[in-house]
Image (cartoon, coloured by chain):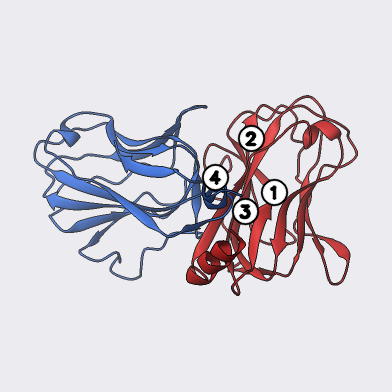
Amino acid sequence: MGALKQALGALHLNEMRAIHRPGVNATDLGTGLDYNIFNVEGAVQVHMMFGQVTTVIGATANLIFLNFTSVVPAATVALCAVTAGAINADAVNTLYVWDGTIAGALTPANNIGHSGSDLIPWVGNTILLSAGIIGVDVGAAGANTGEIDWYILYTPCYAGAEITIL
Amino acid sequence: MSLTQLAQNSFQVGVKGAVNRGVLADMQASPVNLFRVSTGPVLVTQLWGFVTTGITNAVVPILTFNPDTGGAAAIATIMLTCAGDAAGSIYVWGGTRAGAAPVVTAALGMAAALETVMAGNFVILVPGLLYYTNAVVDTTGIVDWFINYIPCTPGASVAAA
C-alpha cells in the first residue's frame, strides 16, 4: 500500500486535496487540554481551514485558537488569534472560520462562511507549512462537551508531502 | 490502510460545477429552489445566473440559504428589479451578505466599469437548500443558475434542487 500511496501522491501532486477530521469529544474538548488535529508530513500550501460544530458545545467557556508545532525548529507558534468570545453553547453548524492570518481570530459564523453581517474572507493567498502538527488550543477553562469537525484544503509541494488526521 | 481509508483521509479535489436549468414556471412562483448541498460542507467559488429568456416584470429575488440544521438566512441583499433584463444578462453574486445583491451584467461577468468579483476566495456552505424568494412574479423570464464549488469531504456535493 505504501508504494501505491506514493504513486497516487506523485500522480496527483499538483492537485488540491481536502481532508476532514471528525471531532471526538473523548479525546478533544472532553479532555480540557489542547489537542492535535492534523499532521503535516512535508511542505504544503494551505488554501483554507475551518471548524464545524457537529455536537452542540457545552457550558465551559473555552477560548480557542489554532497553533502549529514545526519539526524544525521544535517550536509552537500561533496560527491565529484567540476567538473574541468563548465557544460555550455554540449550536450545531456553527463554523469557526479562519481568515488565513496570524492576527485574525477564528470567527464563529452560522451555517455559512458569513458572520452576522458579512463574509469572512480568506485573505491569505496560500500559507506555506513545513512538517509539523496543527493543533487546537482550548485555553484554561477546562473540559467541555461538544464536538468540532475540522477541515483543511491544501496542495502538496512535492510527492509524498501530505496532511493526515490526528 | 485500505483504499477507502486512503481516499477518505486525503482526497484530491478540484473545482466542480452544477447547473439548474431554468423553466418558465420558476419565476411565476416563490420561492425558487436552486441547489441542494449534500453530505458535507463545500466551498463555493462562484454563483451566478444567466438569463436565457428576457424578463418582463419587476422581480426582486433574494438569494437565501436554509441549512438542514439551523435557520434560513438571506445570503445577499435584495436584487434590483430585473424587469427588462434581456437574454444574455448575467447575475453575479459577490459572495457577501451585506454587499451589493447579485449584479446584472451583459454577456460577460463584468459590469460596464469593472469585473464583478467574488469577495474572498471561498464561501462555506453546510448541507442545506439554496433558493431565492421572489416578491414579484414574472410571466416571461427564464434564468439558468450555475454554481462552482470545492467539496470538503468525500461525497460532499451540490446538485440542482
Q: Nearer the viewer, residue A1 or B4?
A: A1
User: What residue is at 71 percent from the left and 34 percent from the top?
Assistant: A24
Identify residue for label 3: A49
Which chain letter matches label 1?
Answer: A
Classify residue A139 as left or right of residue A106: right
Question: Label 4 to label 2, Cα distance in Å?
Answer: 15 Å
Q: Earlier in the sequence, mark 2 or mark 1?
A: 2
User: What residue is at 60 percent from the left and 75 percent from the top?
Assistant: A158
Whole-percent x, y for residue B101 in the image: 37, 49
Mark carried by residue A53 = 2
In the rendered image, residues at marks 2 and 1 fall on the same chain = yes
Whole-percent x, y for residue B123 in the image: 49, 50
Q: Earlier in the sequence, mark 4 or mark 2?
A: 2
For badge 1, the amino acid type reads Leu
User: What residue is at 76 percent from the left and 26 percent from the top?
Assistant: A145
For badge 4, the amino acid type reads His
